[in-house]
Amino acid sequence: MRKTVIAQEAFRNISTGASRTVYLFFVISFILFSGAGWSSRTVVDLSMDAEKFRQAGGSVTIVSAPAKIDGEQCDALSKTSGISSSGAIRQIESITFSALPDRALNQYAITPGFASLLSSTSLETSVSGIWISRDLSSDTGWLAGSKVSLSDGRTSDVAGVYDFPSDGRDQSLAYAVASPYSYSDLFDECWIDSWPISPQSEQLSYLSVLASPDGIFEMEVPTIRQLNSTLGVKFDGSEKFDKVPFVAVQIFLIAISFSSATIWIWTRRLEFSSALHAGVRRADIILQLIIEFSVLMVPAGLVSAIILYFFSHYSNPDPWISSFCVGLKFIFISALAFLLSIIFTPLFLREDNLFRYFKER
């Protein structure tokens, strides 16, 4: 048969419903989107878990050595590969505001680099003023740029407001004031935000601790702790990703796709056996099936890809393209399984079984 005749026959089957168009379209769409949607959302969920871990302070390591932390050295750690931000802190005299005369609030001296742990915008050394917690801001109505009065008659500007939620982390800064200080004084703690989590961050944190001339720490050994360990000691995204049964699901999808295409062809066995009896080549039947499948695969794949795009975007803290590509891989795998079935299943159709197929209809 000529290729044009085969194509005309395929389109005629689709338009008349002889190829079970509706059944095939919904089966293809369901299988494609089920695998793609599941895989895409699994990647997004892992990204959300990672972001939740980081937002909770799980990626922040604290080295504590009272009055032995070099603030400048601590800030400089942020320039090290694998460390996104770092800063030093120490508690100083409490502070009392005129608006809260009966309550002395904890006040902390921080290095310029510490502000990057409190806000997305680093506090430059030229900016004067204090940083207040979100809870304190909510109670007083003070915002960045507000001028506040202290109980001793002095005034100060609010340089910024930082979030420090009650999510299991150390609550020392939850209702407090942070004041930028110079590097001239020593600090008590060095906070390091390592993301992605670096195995070397703990070792690097010791570089901020002053040592005696002989290289030995002049006091007790510094302690290391995690700002918030409620979500685990570490978050290993690669390990979690490797535990997702992607391969098992892919094998399942291949089996379902192959079986669905086989059933689709087998329900038309009488049609194809009659064609073989009439002298139609088996290769022409396969080509006709490929055309019918392709005509339905294009819109089904397009609809699945569009829905997958929105699935990859929704609540995704990371670029959508990574989760989209994972889902797209499942679409290609399912489509390939359909195609393989279309190629191999007709090989088992026999002209000799025409009478039996006729009786079974």
Image (cartoon, rainbow, N blue to C red):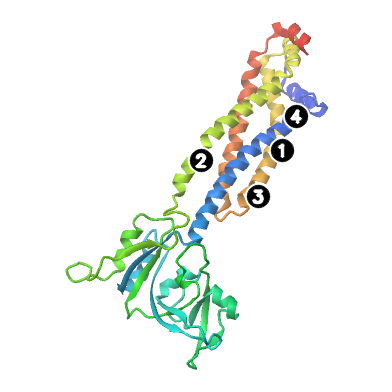
Q: Which mark is residue 244?
A: 2
Earlier residue among tags 1 and 2: 2
Q: Residue 331, relative to residue 51: is it above or below? A: above
How far, Cα to Cα, is label 2 from label 3?
22 Å
Q: Amino acid at mark 4?
A: Tyr
**Residue 248 in view of the camera:** yes
Q: Residue 281, relative to residue 134: is it above or below? A: above
**Residue 71 in view of the camera:** no
Q: Amino acid at mark 1?
A: Pro
Q: Which mark is residue 23?
A: 4
x and y percent of residue 330 in the render? 58, 37
Mark 2, other Cα within 10 Å: few <14 / some 14–19 / many ≥20: few
Q: Amino acid at mark 2?
A: Val
How far, Cα to Cα, is label 4 from label 2?
31 Å
Q: Amino acid at mark 3?
A: Phe
Earlier residue among tags 1 and 3: 1
Q: Which mark is residue 310?
A: 3
**Where's the C terminus, which quadrant?**
top right
Earlier residue among tags 4 and 2: 4
Task: Provide the residue designation for mark 1.
Answer: 299
Dot 3: what SS? helix
x and y percent of residue 89 in the render? 39, 74
x and y percent of residue 158 in the render? 52, 82
Q: Residue 355, relative to residue 37: is it above or below? A: above
